[in-house]
Image (cartoon, grey):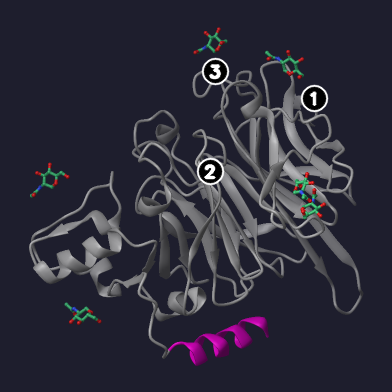
């Protein structure tokens, strides 16, 4: 019903003129360019050069624009006058990297950074009512917090831990800031570096029975031979499912299916699970040639919230896909090397929020973001941006 309504809205809005700061790139360029093109994995699609001056001019202007559209639906998402608003920064690199968790009760977005000392162990929040940053966790300390999500009065955060204390998933009460451990071991074995969290909840309409589970990814990026912030990897990289009602923690996706699970997301009605994979070679600074591809996979969730029917959903054009969010219309938004990329539920690209405009340098990257109401908040390491869109997305 929601998607039908959204579809109608999209159709109604689509014949308007598009805003001057949106560059429309013909979709057919993404698979058919006149001879004489030169693109590289290190750059974005819009950095591709072409001997045809018309194509070259469109790509060059798209490279300078914050909003790159491949589809009229993206122009409708953006609305008639999308504007970028700087909410915080520029400050240090690694300041606003992960998380992007909207908390309605406090009208704030929680996010996490990375780095030595305090920066790597603090969750921050941006109060959207007065654009002030504060620390929402009591006593401040969460060991190497990464991705997270909001669910029923709590923010759930994946914590890497450190060399002596094992990581896991923590739940933080959004009013008191008190943190409690949800899971931190599998039969006495520590996780490696838990990365991201997503809740799924479904109520059977006839029986009223509520089934719920929290999914989280664990990979070995923190291990001594990689980023060296945690102990050596013990468990295989896995997507885990924890059911708090059944009190059962179970592995649901193995590294044979997804070598290095990273971002995880569930759609609104908890029928689909999305997981991004990060080639471990990328974490080593050696490109995307190693282990799995830079891909997002989609699974169906059964009534019991078990992922089945793995399908490849998308590849990122450059670097890797990290944070993923699914909007109310079932579109999939992901943080990738090109910026925040929006695809429809079938995987067709709709548009890109261009990292070349949003980032301070090519060393920085966009790893996560938040969707709230009719806005997109982009964590761009040194800066936090907000974009007012033309429609409600979440
Ligand atoms: C690609 O699409 C553009 C715009 O829709 C059109 O003008 C052009 O002819 C198409 N190119 C080819 C090779 O079909
Ligand atoms: C393509 O661009 C790369 C640099 O990005 C350059 O090294 C290479 O020579 C170019 N190739 C052609 C055929 O122009
Ligand atoms: C956010 O700012 C508003 C307006 O200044 C203030 O009333 C509110 O208490 C702040 N929220 C938090 C969680 O501190
Ligand atoms: C603005 O928000 C911050 C962080 O939530 C809060 O501490 C502060 O009191 C707020 N300022 C005002 C004037 O309400
Ligand atoms: C890990 O964190 C704990 C709790 O803050 C701390 O006591 C310990 O020294 C840390 N270990 C390392 C190796 O930093
Ligand atoms: C990991 O960091 C520790 C502490 O800084 C250091 O002693 C150790 O040599 C490092 N290991 C690797 C493999 O870099």
| Secondary element at tag 3 | loop
Q: Residue at x 45, y 34 (%)?
A: 280
Highlighted range, magenta: 1-14
Q: Specify the principal SS of the magenta part.
A: helix
Is 2 in the magenta? yes
Q: Which residue is mark 1?
A: 188
Q: Nearer the viewer, mark 2 or mark 1?
A: 2
Q: Of label 2 and label 1, which has the lower sequence position?
A: 2
Cα–Cα gap, marks 3 and 1: 21 Å
Q: Which residue is mark 2?
A: 89
Q: Nearer the viewer, mark 3 or mark 1?
A: 3
Q: Nearer the viewer, residue 85 or 340?
A: 85
Q: x, y (%) of residue 100?
A: 63, 50
314 lies above or below 366: below
Dividing the image into 4 quarters, which one contains the N terminus? bottom right
222 lies above or below 216: above
Q: x, y (%) of residue 62?
A: 29, 64
């Amino acid at each position: 019903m929601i998607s039908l309504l959204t579809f109608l809205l999209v159709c109604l809005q689509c014949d308007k003129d598009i805003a001057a700061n949106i560059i429309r790139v013909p979709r057919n360029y993404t698979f058919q360019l006149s001879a004489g093109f030169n693109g590289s994995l290190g750059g974005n699609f819009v950095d591709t050069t072409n001997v045809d001056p018309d194509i070259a001019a469109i790509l060059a202007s798209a490279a300078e624009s914050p909003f790159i559209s491949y589809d009229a639906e993206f122009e409708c998402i953006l609305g008639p006058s999308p504007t970028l608003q700087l909410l915080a920064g520029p400050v240090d690199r690694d300041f606003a990297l992960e998380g992007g968790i909207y908390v309605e009760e406090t009208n704030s977005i929680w996010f996490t950074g990375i780095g030595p000392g305090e920066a790597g162990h603090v969750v921050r929040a941006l109060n959207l009512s007065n654009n002030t940053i504060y620390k929402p966790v009591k006593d401040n300390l969460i060991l190497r917090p990464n991705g997270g999500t909001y669910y029923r009065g709590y923010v759930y955060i994946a914590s890497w831990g450190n060399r002596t204390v094992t990581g896991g998933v923590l739940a933080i009460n959004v009013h008191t800031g008190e943190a409690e451990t949800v899971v931190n071991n599998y039969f006495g074995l520590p996780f490696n570096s838990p990365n991201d969290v997503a809740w799924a909840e479904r109520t059977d309409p006839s029986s009223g029975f509520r089934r719920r589970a929290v999914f989280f990814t664990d990979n070995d990026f923190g291990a001594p031979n990689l980023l060296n912030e945690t102990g050596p990897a013990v468990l295989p990289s896995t997507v885990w499912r924890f059911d708090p009602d059944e009190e059962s923690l179970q592995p649901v996706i193995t590294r044979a299916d997804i070598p290095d699970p990273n971002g995880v997301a569930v759609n609104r009605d908890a029928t689909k699970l999305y997981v991004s994979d990060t080639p471990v070679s990328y974490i080593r600074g050696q490109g995307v040639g190693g282990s799995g591809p830079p891909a997002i996979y989609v699974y169906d969730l059964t009534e019991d919230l078990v992922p089945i029917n793995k399908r490849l959903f998308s590849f990122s054009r450059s670097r890797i896909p990290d944070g993923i969010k699914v909007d109310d219309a079932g579109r999939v938004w992901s943080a990738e090397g090109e910026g925040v990329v929006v695809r429809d539920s079938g995987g067709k690209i709709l548009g890109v929020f261009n990292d070349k405009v949003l980032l301070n340098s090519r060393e920085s990257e966009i790893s996560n973001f938040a969707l709230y109401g009719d806005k997109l908040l982009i964590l761009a390491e040194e800066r936090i941006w907000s974009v007012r869109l033309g429609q409600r997305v979440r």
